[in-house]
Amino acid sequence: MNEIFKISVGISVGDPNGIGIEIILKAFQDKRLFSFFTPIVFAHSESLEKESKRMGFTTPIFLLKDLNTPKRGQLNVVNCWERPFKFNYGKVETAGGVAALSSLKSATAALKKNQVATLVTAPIHKKNIQVKDFNFPGHTDFLNAQLEGESLMFMITEGLRVALVTDHIPLKEIPNQLSKENIGHKLSLLSKSLIQDFGIQRPKIAVLGINPHTGDQGVIGKEDDSILRPLIKQFFDKGQLVFGPFAADGFFGSQSYTKYDAVLAMYHDQGLIAFKTLSFGKGVNFTAGLNRVRTSPDHGTAFDIAGQGMADESSFREALYAARSIYLQRKES
């Protein structure tokens, strides 16, 4: 296979008491992945070896001491923990948060130095990773602070792409973020990503409404009329294919999303409930708008099944392929 299609991918393991390490090991049981990736996992080699043996896996694990010389066809592991992790599956504990943050920081540092081409992150527990130097609601905001550009939370799967104006913020704070300027900025980031990352030269974008039924002509709120409709017209008058606002409750059920290259949702659950209902297990969280490529599976730590061998690695595998595809698209454009 032409070497240009094989990329190095940095992998952070998330909370070790969740399913992160399991889905990583399971994914790379499929040796075909090594034709596309040279994986570099940031954790501790003895931890991965222990879990791999416990689950009966045979993927070769290599302790990598020099990031510039990873082994092909093996799961390279960089020791970013001082000692092997003592697993306590399903438990929210400080040790898990400390290990997750160390893995994420080490992988991000390698990404910034171009020692890995892309980053794929396994799920963190948003509460127990909170420490003095990590005061972020999740990966997206942390990476926004670490990398150049401005982040956009962008959920992708085959036939459906959903981006968010607001993501991990409390519901009561959402109205303050839905200004014409902020929505317009996110719309511009979305359009740029569709062109740069997916090769869609004239993307067609649907914008979901702010209020139920897009306000029903002011009966259920005036924001759709005063903010969204003028903004959408402004984009459309400039030659951009932006349409809406669409009432969110019927938009997905009627399969209207199939007519568009992407959908811009106003807030997290408005877009992600529909997205995960339609794609769970195959969806990917892509942090668009930054100068590096980062993806992750569309699920959390799954503490309820951690350590039981029940975790489905499909979404993690899709995140690997999405990172590679976007990286190569950027190189070509």
Image: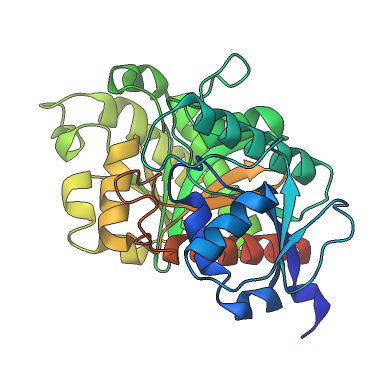
- Residue 119 visible in the displayed image: no
Residue at image position (68%, 38%) is 83
Nearest the camera: 19 or 153?
19
Left or right side of 281 for 37: right
Query: Relative to 128, does residue 216 appear above or below in the rendering?
Result: below
- Residue 49 visible in the displayed image: yes
User: Which residue sits furthest left?
Assistant: 219
Nearest the camera: 308 or 332?
308
Residue at image position (29%, 39%) is 269
Say how many tags the image has.
0
Residue at image position (56%, 18%) is 131
Residue at image position (22%, 24%) is 222
Nearest the camera: 153 or 310?
310
Q: Quadrant of the N terminus?
A: bottom right
Q: Place residue 82 in its image quadrant.
A: top right
User: Which residue sits furthest bottom?
Assistant: 1
Q: Position of residue 21 (x, y in %)?
A: 52, 53
Q: Place residue 252 in its image quadrant.
A: bottom left
Q: Place residue 168 in its image quadrant.
A: top left
In this figure, which colouring scheme has been used for the structure?
rainbow
